[in-house]
Amino acid sequence: MSNELLPDPAVQVAGVREIAPDLLVIPNHGVPLVPNIGIIGGTRAVLVVDTGLGTANAEQVLALATEVAAGRRLYLTTTHFHPEHAFGAHVFAGRADHLVNRAQADDLRAKGEAYLAMFRGLGPSIARRLDADVRVPTPDAVHDGTRELDLGGRTVRLRPTGPGHTNGDQVIEVPDAGVLFTGDLAEAGQFAIFPWFPPHDTDVSGSRWLAVTERLAAAGHRTVVPGHGEVGGPEVLADVRDYLRELRDETWRRRGSAMGEARIAAEVRALLVERHPEWAGREWIERGVGCFCAERPAPVPNP
Ligand SMILES: [Zn+2]
């Protein structure tokens, strides 16, 4: 990543909009390292989905959620352990119960400190967001399998998907409204984010991620809130699924040849940029190629 150019990842709560009754999204306005954040209300309780990066962002999100809740109990959940999604949870301590799936709790414990250090090194605006108060979240409750959370007149499902973008992804379903929060299992208007950082973190799995998007795309959600990018319909998931297939097929087609990985990455990048000229985040293509290259052993040469 070229660090100097990353803008301040500020959550803009003023942009909040209601996408269904008592269901708000704070859109990320296309700013890298700002996630789409959800505030989902029932008659008795309100669930916040993801925190934004660092103390000041999370304080704004909590202030808005508290105002919206107007006395209703607050819960927080996070879609996965990455810092812009979860590393504001300390602000919610004592104000909202933080609920996460088992694999995400494991990711936080195993990799949280390393990601905090890595993100602090990404540039001054990000380091400022990750001030000294920020710490690796310690969830209040951990669920195995799907957790049904009754908010009063509205039950949401916190559904772990199995490994994909990370080991510990979960999606948040709001069945009465037909809404799905995907976390970074889906991004809109940009190439899929592959956190492929060998040798430190190689947990992202292109093949499993593809399988997850195939399942989610077939599930018929009317409204899809991606981790980053515009809220849309089922096409958000279909686009990611199709892109992951392209990335896999174009990588594996070249994998058995004498080409080195750098040349494979250059060719696949050129091809996919040509197919998706309007998408941002081109730097993630090569990491995706690296991931898929590692997933399939080179064929045994003919004797
Ligand atoms: Zn992520």
Image (cartoon, rainbow, N blue to C red):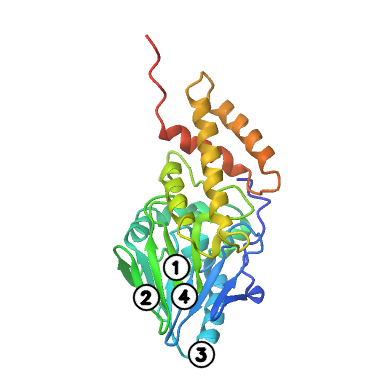
Question: Image quarter for residue 158?
Answer: bottom left
User: 135 or 167: which is nearer to us?
Assistant: 167
The Cα–Cα distance between marks 2 and 1, rounded to whole angstroms, is 10 Å
User: 71 or 148: which is nearer to us?
Assistant: 148
Residue found 41% across the figure and 35% down from its top: 295
| Residue type, numbered disc 4 | Asp
Which percent across, then down, holds residue 223? 55, 66
| Badge 1 element | strand
Q: Which mark is residue 149?
A: 2
Residue found 31% across the figure and 67% down from its top: 142
The answer to whether residue 279 is above or below residue 269 is: below
The Cα–Cα distance between marks 3 and 1, rounded to whole angstroms, is 23 Å
The Cα–Cα distance between marks 3 and 4, rounded to whole angstroms, is 22 Å
Q: Is residue 46 visible?
A: yes
| Figure quadrant of the C terminus | top left
Which residue of the protein is positioned furthest toward the left in this rendering?
A: 144
| Residue type, numbered disc 2 | Leu
Q: Could you tell which of marks 2 and 1 lies nearer the N-terminus? A: 2
| Residue type, numbered disc 1 | Glu
The Cα–Cα distance between marks 3 and 2, rounded to whole angstroms, is 19 Å
Q: Could you tell which of marks 4 and 2 lies nearer the N-terminus? A: 2
| Badge 3 element | loop
Which percent across, then down, holds residue 68? 54, 85
Which percent across, then down, holds residue 23? 54, 77
* Mark 1 lies within 8 Å of ligand 1 (Cβ measured): no
| Residue type, numbered disc 3 | Ala
Q: Which mark is residue 173?
A: 1
Q: Is residue 150 left or right of residue 27?
A: left
Residue holding disc 4: 176
Q: Could you tell which of marks 3 and 1 lies nearer the N-terminus? A: 3
| Labels 4, 1: front one | 4
Q: Which mark is residue 70?
A: 3
